[in-house]
Image (spheres, rainbow, N blue to C red):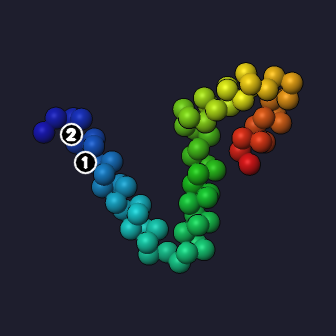
Amino acid sequence: MNTEDLSYRLQGMAARLLMLFFRILPLDAASWTGGWLARTLGPLSSAHKTATKNLALAMPERGQSQNYQWHVG
């Protein structure tokens, strides 16, 4: 087994554990936790950086803070 296979297996196990964790939680708690994770980890993703850059290019008349507030919600 090479390093890439091990990485994929560990990622799969982590995803299964996360899904199990959300399944155990009551609906409201799972929703709140999922929202918190998205708000916390989302800005660290490359997709967030791309969206922020695209908003600045598409709407230069809006300030960076307005675009950020609109993008984040």
Task: Using the image, determine if residue 3 lies above or below residue 23.
Answer: above
Could you classify mark 2 by the number of other residues whose Cα lies within 10 Å: few (under 14), some (14-19), or many (20 or more)?
A: few
Q: Residue furthest front?
A: 58
Q: Which residue occupies 16% across, 35% down?
A: 2
Do callouts 2 and 1 mark residues in contact (Cβ within 8 Å)? yes
Label 1 sits on a secondary structure element that is helix
Left or right? Give the position of 18 relative to 60: left
Q: Which residue occupies 62% across, 57% down?
A: 36
| Closest to the observer, 37 or 48 | 48
Left or right? Give the position of 67 relative to 6: right
Percent x, y of residue 66: 83, 36
Label 2 sits on a secondary structure element that is helix
Q: Which mark is residue 5?
A: 2
**Amino acid at dot 2:** Asp
**Amino acid at dot 1:** Arg
Could you classify mark 1 by the number of other residues whose Cα lies within 10 Å: few (under 14), some (14-19), or many (20 or more)?
A: few
Percent x, y of residue 49: 61, 31
Percent x, y of residue 47: 56, 35
Circle 1 residue: 9
Q: Which residue occupies 24% across, 35% down?
A: 4
Name which quarter of the figure residue 15 lies in: bottom left
